[in-house]
Image (spheres, rainbow, N blue to C red):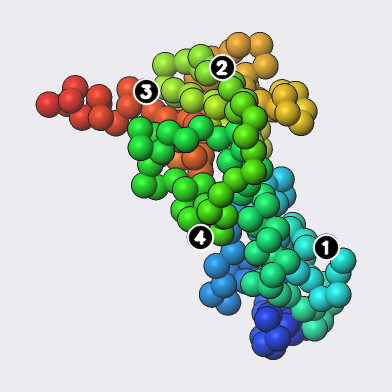
Amino acid sequence: MAKTLPVWINKKLVEVPNKGFTALQILQKEGYQIPHFCYHEHLPIAGNCRMCLIELGNAVKPIASCAFVPVAPNTQFYTNTIITRKAREGVLEFLLANHPLDCPICDQGGECDLQDQSLLYGSDRGRFYESKRAVEDKNTGPFIKTVMTRCIHCTRCVRFANEVAGFDTIGVVGRGHNMEIGTYVQNFITHEMSGNIIDLCPVGVLRPTPPPSLAALLRE
């Protein structure tokens, strides 16, 4: 088996290691910025946020680059076409349809992936004028505070808990419009590694308890 694989990125031929890398990993190694929410290099692939869409050769629809592994030489990727830009814009429009507009008071403000990518890839207006969906905050225990209305269902926290840390207290409940992240039977999250899911959250859903501002006051 050849050690490298020739692929075309935006009509430019590059040689990439033939080690089973996904399209997203290849593009990142070549210096291309691909937006994503659910992908994390140390977590299993989910492919559910659909933000990393790119065009593949003559494919009819864009593909999720985080879940596509090129196995054929001369695979063609296009990262910045009109179709990919409109697809990402559409994904962000759906994510923001139910997301609260509380960036000025959000704990994640200024370091929020959704905020940054909305600025770079989103539209300057929305088409949803209906009432936003509200989700009740979950009482997860003494370590993690939740603001569940901000959740974009990237499932990073669920995958870390289930497949890395090895506890299944947190998971996905419901489908479609009723989908929520939470504990199945109102259990507390008390695992010794549970605090890591706070850092994995790309938006301000999971925050430490007490919040950093209060913790600083307590230290003084």
Quick one: label 4, few (<14), some, or many (20+) residues within 10 Å? Answer: few
Q: Which residue is mark 4?
A: 120
From mark 2 to mark 4, how far is it between C-alphas?
30 Å
Residue 157 in sight: no
Q: Nearer the viewer, mark 4 or mark 3?
A: 4
Q: Which residue is situated farthest in the left direction here?
A: 220
* Total residue callouts: 4
Tell me if residue 24 comes above or below residue 76 in the rendering.
above
Q: Earlier in the sequence, mark 2 or mark 3?
A: 2
Where's residue 43, x and y in %? 62, 47
Q: Nearer the viewer, mark 2 or mark 3?
A: 2
Quick one: label 1, few (<14), some, or many (20+) residues within 10 Å? Answer: few
C-beta proximity under 8 Å, tags 2 and 3: no
Give the number of the disc on residue 160.
none
C-beta proximity under 8 Å, tags 2 and 4: no
Q: Earlier in the sequence, mark 1 or mark 3?
A: 1
Q: Amino acid at mark 1?
A: Lys
Q: Residue at x 68, y 72 (%)?
A: 81
Q: Amino acid at mark 4?
A: Leu
Q: Earlier in the sequence, mark 4 or mark 3?
A: 4
Q: Which residue is mark 3?
A: 209
Tell me if residue 40 comes above or below residue 3 in the rendering.
above
In the structure shown, which secondary structural element does the residue marked by tag 4 occupy?
Answer: helix
Q: Which residue is mark 1?
A: 61
